[in-house]
Amino acid sequence: MKLGLHIPDYTWPGGPRDLATNLAAIARGAEDAGFDRVSVMDHVWQIGHIGPPEHEMLEAYTTLGFLAANTTRVSLLTLVTGTVYRSPGLLAKIVSTLDVLSGGRAMLGIGAAWNEEESRGLGLLFPPTAERFERLEETIRICLQMWSGDDGPFEGAHYRLGRTLNVPQPLSRPHPPILIGGSGEKKTLRLVARYAQACNLFGGPDLAHKLEVLRSHCEAEGRDYDEIEKTALYNFDLGERGERAGQVVEELGELAGTGIQVAHGRLLRPWDMRNFEILGSEVVPAVAGL
């Protein structure tokens, strides 16, 4: 099993003045501990279950560029980009740029978007649910076209691009992996089966069922289910002094038993570098063979 560090919160000791220093240290700590990837949220306000909207939040792709400059190995992605927050041609260019400047470490994490409050607040596009899913599929198709080297036009129901020129092309081959976040059975998991190299699901009692739904969509699409990397959200709660490390290993083992290949989630108190020492010495080696 691989591990991914998700950074959804920037309200840390030291405040904004120390944020860049702390963020760089956290990303390097995750890399040194053996984490496979680092992700950030694609939100402009903090979300409710983490903190009030007035708490610190950084723009996602600016942050990923900063993380690229402060790491050398981990993959970098959003978990996940709201498809309507950027025009598809610009999004493909942004991820291409991140991939080139990181040496081929970018992934496109993407979903249909859900946070109407921040969207209305800052004037971002936020159409009804059905349209957001239509735009999600068109966005993925546009990205794939731009990453294929085909610079012809694109004509969709919502997006029309006159020339999909994208130079330089990403270093990742055949393109940056696409991860679709969400567990909706009728639309999201169908899009995973059709387009994605990875999915991100919520942990919980229905996880095995969601994976079976994905398998059925893969059969309908003629897609090999085993080609898709299965990732799930997980909170790395090591306790105050690392006393829960063994419990974390046990929980990750249970998660791996359902078919999850990457546990990707939040670390409580990430600014405490002792957490990464414990993860690197006790957790990562213990789950590597799962």
Image (cartoon, rainbow, N blue to C red):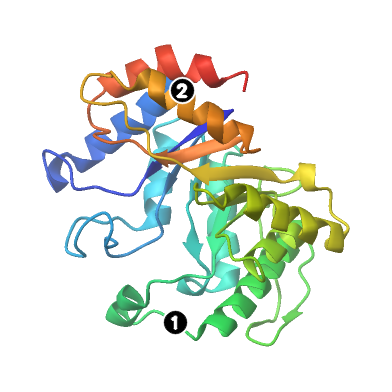
Q: Is residue 39 visible?
A: yes
Q: Residue at point 28% right, 36% down?
A: 268
Is 64 left or right of 73, judged from the image as shown?
Answer: left
Is 168 left or right of 215, judged from the image as shown?
Answer: left
Q: Which mark is residue 230?
A: none
Q: Which of marks 2 and 1 precedes in the sequence? A: 1
Res. 171 image quadrant: top right
What residue did someone put label 2 on? 249
Q: Is residue 205 above or below residue 191?
A: above
The quadrant in which the C terminus is found is top right
Give the x, y percent position of residue 199: 62, 51
Q: Nearer the viewer, residue 89 or 201?
A: 201
Q: Is residue 73 above or below residue 164?
A: above
Q: Which mark is residue 126?
A: 1
Tag 2: amino acid: Val
Q: For label 1, count other residues whose C-alpha is less than 10 Å away and answer few (under 14), some (14-19) or many (20+).
A: many
- Separation (CA) of disc 1 from disc 2: 40 Å
Give the x, y percent position of residue 191: 69, 65
Secondary structure of residue under mark 1 = loop
Give the x, y percent position of residue 15: 12, 45
Q: Residue at point 49% right, 71% down?
A: 86
Q: Residue at point 47% right, 70% down?
A: 113
